[in-house]
Amino acid sequence: MLVKTFGSAVYGVEAITITIEVNVSAGQHYTIVGLPDNAVKESLQRMESAIKTNDWYMPRIKIVVNLAPADIKKSGSAFDLPIAIGVLGASEQIEEPERLAEYIIMGELSLDGTVRPIKGALPIAIQARKEGFKGLIVPKANEREAGMVNNLKVYGVEHIKEVVEFFKDETSLKPVEVNTREEFFDAQQYFDVDFNDVKGQENIKRALEIAAAGGHNAILIGPPGAGKTMLARRLPTILPPLSLYEALETTKIHSVAGKLPENSSLISRRPFRSPHHTISDVALVGGGGIPQPGEISLAHNGVLFLDELPEFKRTVLEVMRQPMEERKVSISRAKVAVDFPASFMLIASMNPCPCGFYNHPDRECTCPPGAVQKYLNKISGPLLDRIDLHVEVTPVAFSELSNMQAKGESSSVIRERVIRAREIQTERYKGIEGMYANAQMSSKQLREICVINTAGENLLKRAMEKLNLSARAYDRILKVSRTVADLAGSADIKVEHLAEAIQYRSLDREGWAG
């Protein structure tokens, strides 16, 4: 007897519906066809054990399982449950097997029939709704994730018995109900950290406020213990809240990568990813035989923090250059090509030299001549060219550290200013698809939007000559000054806005590294 069930395979951040055809007929051997990988082939052993353990009959005749379309590679263990249900239907242990075609069924089976979690439940649910399926049956651990999709009945199960009894009408499963909007907006305001935890460093907080307001990449340069990491980890608390669309997009990526906690729903806060400097280029940008998202995609709509930037392998840093420009990464393999979104803010930190104390106000640098420049040269010019703000971080004085009464501005106050500046930019770039912040301006747009008066031109000219700033600093200064003006609510870029932007180009100054 031939029975069809339906599952789903995830490619990139999208799902493709897979038809699972199970035919039980006279003959011998169990066979799975349709480009299955080893994990899919092994499902026969898991399925057989689960069926026998629960006192059902495993046919001792020929079973052919076809995963269609047959020219697409199938991977993972999530096809265990739909194959097992298909076998039970084809062997007439489930009556009315035509009902099976109304549902997408996904789940990994343990040998005793327990249903284990899967990856990519959210894109699978979105595709199931798009194709008009009556419902989706997923592991209990994934029900809230899939339940975010409205107009689709999502059933969470813990054991194969629940699925069989559901199709036999011996029990009823209750669809999960998730109030996505209420949970999403309630969770957006809660953070474990706050900018008022940081003593002193007001100039660094201001630089990060500018970075958040304009979507600018930034690099923090300073000695060990100056607070670079502490400040960077608080950046998401002042970024504008995620929109529902951004949250859904971000959640899909984390779902595909298997990074969502059990029983979680929509990601409500901007991601903060901080990979170790030993990371490989594939782990950073994504890849593999079946391409998976890397750290830059997991940081989509959030912050990618690279601590101790010069310690990363040069090849790892160079592969980021194209995704930083295009805000997506394209991964091509022999049989598949996928695009992962990668619109992130890059925040990097570094010591100024190998010993860490170059330009320190109190301690002397012990590095030999040329070591500072050699250390800085580990970061290529094209990568530095994509970083708008170079911020020097100095140690906090003891008097500020010991002042228990002093409280800086809270993240919520800074965030309000950032949101107002972003609203100005949203209006400015309203007719341009894919643009939402000043950091994304092209050279042509820069000339149209960042117009400065004669006094501003004179200041910029003197700064370029006196500080020996490089040519690439010119555009960056204009972009940052536009953001400073937006924070001030000014329609025009004034001299004071340019002056503040000029100070954030430390690494472009000739002779900075000795």
Image: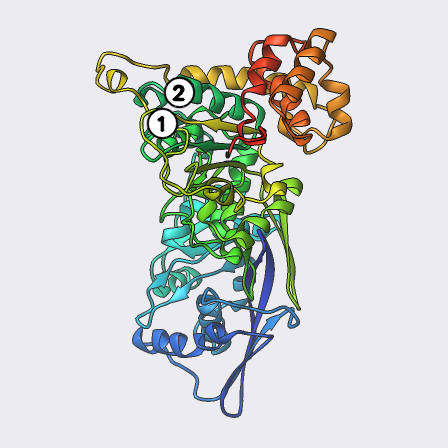
Q: Nearer the viewer, mark 1 or mark 2?
A: 2
Is there any visible trace of residue 408 in the rendered image?
yes
- Residue that carries the numbered disc 2 in the rendered image: 411
In the image, residue 123 lies at what x, y percent?
Answer: 54, 50
Residue in the foreground of this view, choosing between 422 and 482: 482
Q: Is residue 49 above or below residue 160?
A: below
Q: Name the quadrant of the N terminus.
A: bottom right
**Direction from residue 9 to residue 428 in the image, left or right:** right
- Residue 175 visible? The answer is no
Residue type, label 2? Ser
Q: Amino acid at mark 1?
A: Tyr
Asked which secondary structure carries label 2, the reply is helix
Task: Mark 1: give few (<14), some (14-19) or many (20+) Cα within 10 Å.
Answer: few
Q: Position of residue 190 (x, y in %)?
A: 36, 27
Of residue 505 and residue 185, the one placed in the foreground of this image is 505
Q: Position of residue 410 (x, y in %)?
A: 36, 17
Upstream in the sequence, badge 1 or badge 2?
A: 1
Tell me what residue is drawn at x 49 percent, y 71 percent: 86
Residue 185 to residue 293: above or below: above
The reply, left or right, for residue 414 in relation to residue 500 is left
Among the 4 quarters of the image, the one containing residue 496: top right
Q: Nearer the viewer, residue 423 or 496?
A: 496
Dot 1 corresponds to which residue? 190
Task: Name above or below for residue 498 compared with residue 365.
Answer: above
Disc 2 residue crowd, few under 14, some 14–19, many 20+, Cα 10 Å: many
Rendered residue at 47%/53% (across/down): 257
Residue 108 at x, y percent in the picture: 41, 65
Question: Residue 382 lies in what quarter of the image?
Answer: top right
